[in-house]
Amino acid sequence: MDLINTISVWLLPLLFAITFHEAAHGYVARFLGDHTASQLGRVSLNPIRHIDPFGTVLLPGLLLFAHSPFLFGYAKPVPVNFRALRHPRLGMVLVAAAGPAMNIALAIAAALSFHLVVYLPPAVAQWTALNLKNAVVINAVLAVFNLFPLPPLDGGRIAVGLLPNVLGRWLARLEPYGMTILIGMIIVLPLLGTQFGIDLGFASHAITAATNAVIKVIMQVTANI
């Protein structure tokens, strides 16, 4: 039962977080004129439509069983044809921002729900409180991570849309290599640094610091601290 509880209090919030994140992209894209995701059935809050077998199930499960200090996962990206948007440049910014904005909204909703836990039976209250706590953390992590200004992350697409054309086009060219660069900054560089006694985890430190700051603000705004 302990194992089932552990899985449920981590994977359920993660499933909701990434499902609502991807659905938000689809809803905003449809509102702004692109029906690609809608035609493919991806404008939906049905988690099955967004689940990626590895990113949504296997990867978080492996991290959980390995007692990783963090839990992460992802869903199938929602397809968006930015040229079909009524205002492609601004639309790209709004569609990209929708995912992290949804995660912040979910984190706030979870934090507000802490105030209702006291009305639940003790056995249910503990499980619910753990789910809500993890929901705040997971949604904050996803929001901050996805706002990292590197395509194909949401933050990269927001930056491409807001920067002057010359800089935006240069940044957009990095999209095919974005995830490789990100893995290098977050995993490879810190590992190399440990071999030479140098702390090269600046990207991880920045994401962690920003995530902690976001969580602190959310907990303060919702009167939990």
Image (cartoon, rainbow, N blue to C red):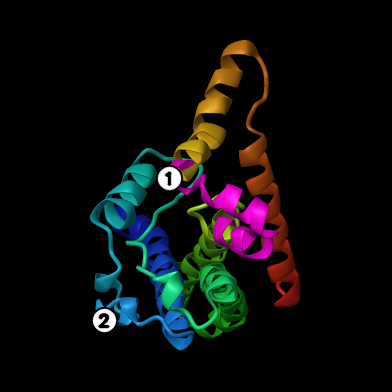
> Which portion, as a residue range, is magenta?
156-177
Q: Residue furthest top?
A: 196
Residue identifier under label 1 = 176
Q: Nearer the viewer, residue 154 or 15?
A: 154
**Residue type, numbered disc 2:** Gln
Which quadrant of the rendered structure holds the N terminus?
bottom left
Which quadrant of the rendered structure holds the C terminus?
bottom right
**Residue 146 has which mark?**
none
The vertical placement of 143 against 70, above or below, is below
Q: Nearer the viewer, residue 166 or 73?
A: 166
**Left or right relative to 222: residue 126:** left
Question: Callout 1: few (<14), some (14-19), or many (20+) C-alpha neighbours within 10 Å?
Answer: few
Q: Callout 2: helix, strand or loop?
A: helix
Q: CA distance from mark 1 to mark 2?
A: 26 Å
Q: Earlier in the sequence, mark 1 or mark 2?
A: 2
**Residue 39 has which mark?**
2
Q: Nearer the viewer, residue 49 or 116?
A: 49
The vertical placement of 160 against 21, above or below, is above
**Residue type, numbered disc 1:** Pro
Task: Report if residue 173 lies within the magenta region.
Answer: yes
The vertical placement of 129 against 188, above or below, is below
Task: Report if residue 194 lies within the magenta region.
Answer: no
Question: Callout 2: few (<14), some (14-19), or many (20+) C-alpha neighbours within 10 Å?
Answer: few
Q: Position of residue 58 (x, y in %)?
A: 27, 49
Q: Position of residue 86 (x, y in %)?
A: 50, 83
Residue found 53% across the figure and 23% down from its top? 191
Residue found 57% across the figure and 71% down from its top? 89
Residue found 51% across the figure and 44% down from its top? 174
Residue found 35% across the figure and 82% down from its top? 35
Give the prevailing secondary structure in the magenta stretch.
Answer: helix
Name the quadrant containing residue 41. bottom left
